[in-house]
Image: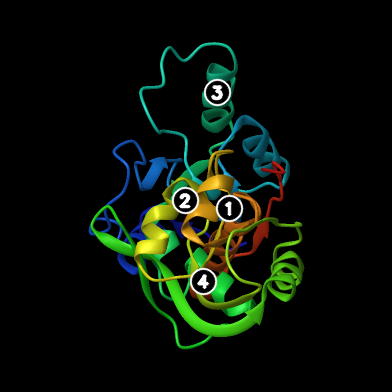
Amino acid sequence: MPKVPLKSIVAHCDHILRTAEIGDYDGAVNGLQVENSGAVTRIAATVDATLATVKLAIAAKTDLLIVHHGLFWSKTHPWTGKRRELLQLLIENDLAVYSSHLPLDAHPKLGNNALLAAALGFRKLQPFFLSHGQNIGLKTSAKISRAELAKRLARVTGAEPKVLPGGTEMCERIGIVTGGAGGELKQAAAEGVDTFITGEGPHRTYALAEELGLNVFYGGHYATETFGVKALAAELSKKFKLPWVFLDHPTGL
């Protein structure tokens, strides 16, 4: 079984994702979050770094876990109870964790937004949705009915979207920002789209979508963000000749 130095994989990820250059939430901690003893033989990819997905990675006999939502978003202490169990499992099973949040969202080939747009059949994409110093989403012009777009989104994500029909039945200027951008409908509308595809949003956005004349598709935070980690793991597998597996642990949210 081939062994690849962890530092080589981390360096490649940091380079292609431009980890040091892409702005993000203060607590995101993009990059290597937990190291192992230094070698990788098998890679796992999953959306969220949690006790449950760490157990899945261990069961799959992997030594590097690629995630979109990492272990650290704010101060996380004390490390007791389930947090202690998580730490102990990582160390005892020599499992490294690499996390990429907005750098993976924004990547033009491996990113969640680029891959969701491609899966939906959209072309001629333009940068969209400024966040933390850079555009992380994509927009396009394409005439498609609201009903057909809902069917297409359900097909590519495997989850039925929640549709807020605030605009016209025909969608023509469509913006995509995977994940939790539902609280930013005003920004999406101000950037010129009549239809906004994202993962989830709060209750108040139904009325706001009507006020803005905006169609909104909540495709699921989890469901819209499985694309990037799969693509990154596949890229690493190809470059370093290592096997990889996707660990599906859907939240339904």
User: What's the residue at 51%, 30% (across, down)?
Assistant: 91
Q: Quadrant of the N terminus?
A: bottom right
Disc 3 from disc 2: Cα separation: 34 Å
The residue under label 1 is 199
Viewer-side label of 4, 2:
2
- Crowding around mark 2 (Cα neighbors within 10 Å: few <14, some 14 to 19, many 20+) is many
Q: How crowded is mark 1: few (under 14 residues within 10 Å), some or many (20 or more)?
A: many
Q: Is residue 131 visible?
A: yes
Task: Give the label on residue 88, or none.
Answer: 3
Label 2 with label 1: CB-CB less than 8 Å: yes
For the point 42% across and 50% down, the residue is: 184
User: What number is the disc on residue 235?
Assistant: 4
4 or 2: tag closer to the N-terminus:
2
Mark 3: few/some/many CA within 10 Å (<14, 14-19, 20+): few
Q: Residue furthest bottom?
A: 124
- Counting other residues with Cα less than 10 Å from the Cα at mark 4, is it few (<14), some (14-19), or many (20 or more)? some
Say which element carries label 2: helix
Q: In this view, does 168 lie above or below 204?
A: below
What's the CA distance linking mark 4 and mark 3?
29 Å
Sequence-wise first label, 4 or 3: 3
Asked if labels 2 and 3 touch by Cβ distance under 8 angstroms, the answer is no
Q: What residue type is labelled 3?
A: Gln
Badge 3 element: helix
Image location (x, y in percent) of residue 140: 47, 80
Say which amino acid is labelled 2. Ala
Ranked by sequence position, the earlier of labels 4 and 1 is: 1
Task: Read off the residue under disc 2.
Answer: 181
Q: Earlier in the sequence, mark 1 or mark 3?
A: 3
